[in-house]
Amino acid sequence: MVDRILYVEIPVKNIPFSLNWYSEVLQFQKVWHSMEEKLAQLNLPSGQMLFLSETSDNTNANFSKNGEEHSVIGFQTKDIDELYNTLKKSGATVEPLVIDPEGYRFLHFYDPDGNRLTALCDSIGDEI
């Protein structure tokens, strides 16, 4: 019935600012932006789409489970250390790297609008 996730849409306060942040910091490709619709599309090199939807509502793309905040979007990266350093340099809020019991490395961070995002490294690491 359903084959794959086509896109994810997240709330932002200022589309031009968020477009620049996602393209410069996370290296998403800008596809289009509609001021009238207050909507923009970015793509990853692998084709997945991320839509930014401008809103004045006090909301973000996070949820909580048993009092712990969770991300709605998880990305994959080949170099989690480079991503960590790039995010820190950009001024983003970045949590410490986490290694799960299997040895996979995770990174939780926030975009400028408070959307909590997660990245998982493709390869298993030995140390943080």
Image: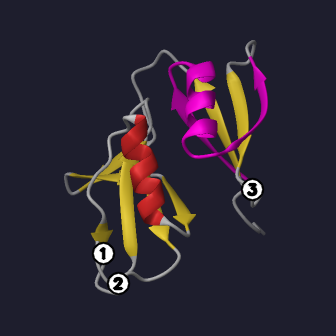
Amino acid of disc 1: Ile
Relative vertical location of residue 36 with respect to residue 85 in this rendering, above or below = above
Pointer 1 residue: 99
Residue 55 visible somewhere in the drawing? yes
Pointer 3 residue: 45
Q: Which residues are magenta?
A: 6-34
Relative vertical location of residue 31 with respect to residue 103 in this rendering, above or below = above
Percent across and percent down for residue 108 are: 36, 55
User: In the figure, is residue 51 to the left or right of 119?
Assistant: right
Which residue is pictured at 74% across the width and 54% down the height?
6
Q: Nearer the viewer, residue 68 or 43?
A: 43
Disc nearer the start of the sequence (3/1): 3
Disc nearer the start of the sequence (2/3): 3
Q: Quadrant of the N terminus?
A: bottom right
Percent across and percent down for residue 105 are: 38, 72
Q: Is residue 27 magenta?
A: yes
Percent across and percent down for residue 84 are: 40, 54
Disc sitting over residue 103 in the figure: 2
Crowding around mark 3 (Cα neighbors within 10 Å: few <14, some 14 to 19, many 20+) is few
Marks 1 and 2 sit apart, C-alpha to C-alpha, by 5 Å
Amino acid of disc 3: Pro
Q: How many marks?
A: 3
